[in-house]
Image: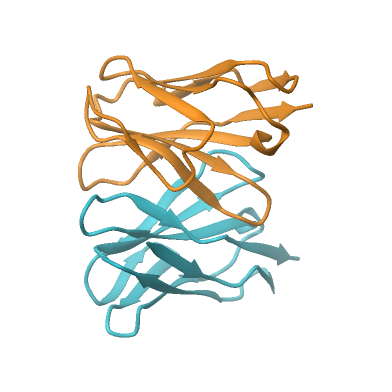
Amino acid sequence: GQSLEQPSEVTAVEGAIVQINCTYQTSGFYGLSWYQQHDGGAPTFLSYNALDGLEETGRFSSFLSRSDSYGYLLLQELQMKDSASYFCASEGSNDYKLSFGAGTTVTVRA
Amino acid sequence: NAGVTQTPKFQVLKTGQSMTLQCAQDMNHNSMYWYRQDPGMGLRLIYYSASEGTTDKGEVPNGYNVSRLNKREFSLRLESAAPSQTSVYFCASNPRDQPQHFGDGTRLSIL
């Protein structure tokens, strides 16, 4: 099975940097994904790491350390539209199913 | 391009009623999934279908059945709805080794 832990809430001001940590315990691990969800709508894919290191996609970056069973999502130059829930999800090595963390609600203040 | 379409968007049922949630994707994806999302619990996998003709249980399959009708459609059925099944249900699809695409969800309340 898989279990993932991430903080429940983070608040920051516009222009700031936020890091959302995710630790996972898995019986088999292939990669770590990050999804964004606005106001209970459809989750949308942000980033994916299968190998150790940093993946950068515009203002968002994601990092993975397989030896530490740890990853993070870095949100830079925060904007009001970044207020949303962010989920880490681990992908199993046997079946490629996703197991999601409980989500981190990010609130961006003016 | 519609992506993943779920119907209905909202539904209220009485305990014991049956209901089928519909999901269709127009991206020619092999894999399809059904999740439920409850407050503070993230998304939990109910059932998935790795390809047309196959279905497998996820983390929380009890009380649900699924049908992969063809490559496009994957339905979720509640045979006898219970208040504990009040939730938001999301369907998703993906090609192998690619991110999942989600529908807008079905908000289901069971009284």
Quadrant of the frame with the N terminus of chain A = bottom left
Please, is residue B107 above or below residue A100 in the view? above
Quadrant of the frame with the C terminus of chain A = bottom right
Quadrant of the rendered image containing residue B25: top left
Q: Residue at x 29, y 25 (%)?
A: B27
Left or right: B16 with respect to A65? right
- Pick whichever, B100 or A3, lies toward us: A3
> Residue B34: where, in percent of width, then height?
44, 35
Please, is residue B79 above or below residue B108 in the view? above
Per the rendering, the colour in which chain A appears is: cyan
> Residue B2: where, in percent of width, then height?
42, 21
Quadrant of the rendered image containing residue B41: bottom right
Which color mode does the image show? by chain
Total marks in image? 0
Chain letter for the orange colouring in the rendering = B
Q: Residue at x 26, y 51 (%)?
A: A96
Please, is residue A17 above or below residue A1 in the view? below
The residue sitting at the right extreme is: B111
Q: Residue at x 39, y 69 (%)?
A: A61
Quadrant of the rendered image containing residue B18: top right
- Pick whichever, A20 or A102, lies toward us: A102
Q: Residue at x 54, y 71 (%)?
A: A6
> Residue B62: where, in percent of width, then height?
50, 37
> Residue B31: where, in percent of width, then height?
27, 34
The residue sitting at the bottom extreme is: A68
